[in-house]
Amino acid sequence: LKHRIPLLMLVSYRGGPGLPDNRDYHLLEGEVTRPVLEALRIPIYEVYRPGEANRIETARERATLGKQPVAVLLGREALIE
């Protein structure tokens, strides 16, 4: 946040709490992703279905206008269709 650089991060978010996944290797990702972003005070937007993709634009606007990094967590259904 110190350098005020806008950054939009699109992050795969499989295996998170309440998001069962049939691939064990996603469980650690799902367990640590949100706490790490929160510890860094990075705003988080979530997209779990293709119909929620407009949240990506909202996140981009926040990153641009706020000159800050913003993360969009993409659930499995948002990635596979």
Image: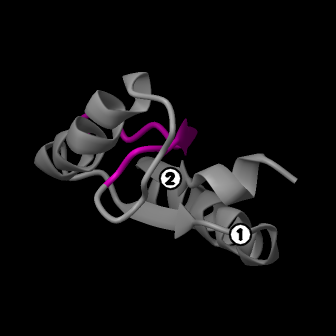
SS class, disc 1 = loop
Give the mark nearer the N terminus: 2 vs 1: 1
Residue at the spot x=17%, y=47% of the render?
35
The amino acid beneath tag 1 is Arg
Secondary structure mostly seen in magenta is loop
Name the residue nearer the viewer: 29 or 62. Answer: 29
Q: Which mark is residue 49?
A: 1
Which quadrant would residue 59 be assigned to in this image?
A: bottom right
Give the colour scheme shown.
one colour
Q: Which mark is residue 7?
A: none
Which residue does the numbered mark 2 point to in the structure image? Answer: 73
Give the Cα distance between marks 2 and 1.
Answer: 11 Å
Q: Which residues are magenta?
A: 1-16
The amino acid beneath tag 2 is Leu
Task: Indicate whether 2 appears above or below 44.
Answer: above
Task: Count how many numbered circles sit on residues in the image.
Answer: 2
